[in-house]
Image: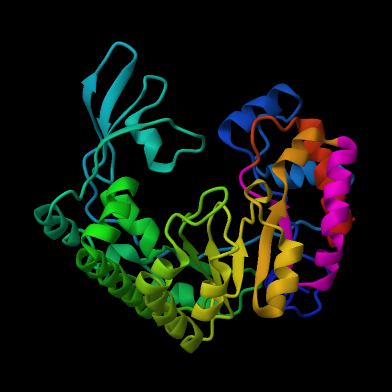
């Protein structure tokens, strides 16, 4: 069975030969610690190296070419330092945010930060209607730069692939937060819902066009939305508000995804998502991650509640990986019935933090490999 078949059979509650092996990756600070504890600096695939250190001998998935679709603004804002201070700097990032960061970072690092960056937000790119009119000009979904230059040839090549190919887009809540900032977004849901609907509709149409253009060349295996719209105990907006403002967009995208025979429509959101899952199911979403345990996500209980309507990825408590020993043994044992039942690809419930020692990560990798059929 190839990697693509294994991925789809697992998440669609079929019978794979083994479950995809995705222990997770470390943050930049985590990798720095691991290098001090024995991980060679020359290693590029840390998960495979940990698997080999744990005694794993099976062939490692090789992956393959993807079909990148660029949703981000074109052109982007100039990255620059606005003001240097004694212990910090004020910068403008590529999205147009003005924020204060530490001197240990560069403004370019914010583009794809691999670790946490504490920021003091000063100005977001959309604060007025005039800002919004300007922002819309950065999103032409038919710009050729948004797609591979060799899209037709790449699509033909990928038709016979044995690896997973997918598209990833920001959900409407995520994208409006990028434009407005979190506080202003929440205020506008109450004070100016018409403007919220206008921005959601704009983003919905943008992604619709990206999907339609890309699916002319390749049939994806998964379309993943990123929302990050929940705190530790509750969603950032109410389920009623989610249903009113966001559900129609999720449903519209889902119709296009299904029409193009993509079997996996997935949602990524940190925090406690239990009150959101029923809405996502209604939208046709059938997979969600990373299922953070510290936020009260009990995926065994979710399986009892939602059955095969929702599959999961992640869900291994990072706190128990850090504890190692019997703690992580107990965590994998807790999840083993769900692994065997299908519809679940286990892995760390977010990026592996720096309090996880390298020997404990290797132990966790071994236990996970045994539970998923890789050892």
Residue 227 drawn at (x, y percent): 46, 59
- Left or right of residue 343, residue 200 in this image: left
Which residue lies at the image location 70% right of the left edge and 42% below the top edge? 318
Image: magenta residue range? 325-351
User: In which quarter of the view is residue 334 placed?
Assistant: bottom right
Quadrant for the N terminus, please: bottom right
Q: Is residue 52 visible?
A: no
Q: Is residue 14 left or right of residue 212?
A: right
92 within the magenta span: no
Q: Quadrant of the C terminus?
A: bottom right
Residue 213 seen in the current view: yes
Write the residue at 83% across / 60% down. 372
Image spot of residue 175 (x, y percent)? 34, 58
In the displayed orientation, state which residue is furthest to the top.
86
Magenta-colored segment: predominant secondary structure? helix
Q: Residue at x 57, y 33 (%)?
A: 28
Q: Position of residue 189 (x, y in %)?
A: 29, 60
Q: How many marks?
A: 0
Please tell me which residue is depicted at 81% across the width and 78% down the height of the picture. Answer: 15
Q: Nearer the viewer, residue 34 or 160?
A: 34
* Above or below 32: residue 78: below
Q: Return the residue nearer the eye: 280 or 158.
A: 280
Question: Looking at the picture, how far across and down is residue 241, in whole percent?
Answer: 39, 67
Q: Is residue 149 above or below residue 308?
A: above
Coloring scheme used: rainbow
């Amino acid at each position: 069975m190839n990697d693509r078949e294994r991925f789809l059979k697992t998440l669609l509650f079929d019978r794979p030969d083994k479950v995809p092996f995705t222990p997770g990756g470390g943050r930049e600070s985590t990798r720095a610690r691991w290098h001090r504890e024995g991980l060679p600096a020359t290693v590029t695939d840390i998960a495979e190296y940990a698997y080999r250190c744990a005694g794993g001998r099976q062939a490692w998935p090789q992956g393959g070419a993807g079909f990148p679709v660029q949703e981000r603004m074109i052109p982007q804002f100039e990255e620059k330092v606005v003001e240097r201070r004694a212990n910090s700097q004020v910068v403008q990032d590529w999205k147009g945010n003005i924020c204060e960061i530490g001197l240990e970072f560069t403004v370019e690092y914010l583009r794809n930060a691999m670790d946490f960056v504490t920021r003091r937000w000063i100005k977001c790119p959309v604060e007025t209607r005039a800002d919004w009119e300007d922002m819309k000009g950065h999103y032409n979904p038919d710009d050729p730069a948004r797609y591979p230059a060799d899209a037709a040839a790449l699509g033909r090549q990928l038709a016979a692939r044995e690896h997973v190919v997918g598209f990833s887009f920001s959900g409407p809540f995520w994208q409006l937060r990028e434009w407005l900032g979190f506080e202003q977004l929440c205020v506008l849901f109450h004070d100016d819902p018409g403007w919220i609907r206008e921005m959601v509709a704009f983003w919905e149409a943008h992604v619709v066009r990206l999907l339609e253009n890309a699916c002319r060349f390749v049939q994806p295996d998964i379309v993943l939305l990123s929302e990050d719209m929940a705190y530790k105990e509750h969603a950032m907006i109410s389920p009623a508000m989610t249903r009113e403002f966001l559900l129609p967009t999720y449903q519209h995208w889902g119709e296009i995804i299904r029409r193009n025979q993509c079997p996996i429509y997935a949602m990524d959101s940190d925090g406690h998502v239990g009150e959101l899952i029923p809405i996502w199911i209604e939208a046709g979403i059938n997979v969600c991650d990373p299922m953070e345990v510290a936020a009260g996500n009990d995926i065994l209980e979710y399986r009892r509640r939602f059955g095969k309507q929702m599959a999961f990825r992640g869900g291994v408590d990072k706190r128990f990986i850090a504890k190692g020993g019997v703690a992580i043994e107990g965590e994998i044992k807790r999840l083993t019935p769900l692994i065997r039942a299908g519809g679940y690809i286990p892995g760390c419930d977010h990026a592996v933090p720096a309090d996880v020692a390298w020997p404990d990560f290797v132990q966790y990798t071994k236990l996970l490999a045994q539970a998923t059929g890789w050892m």
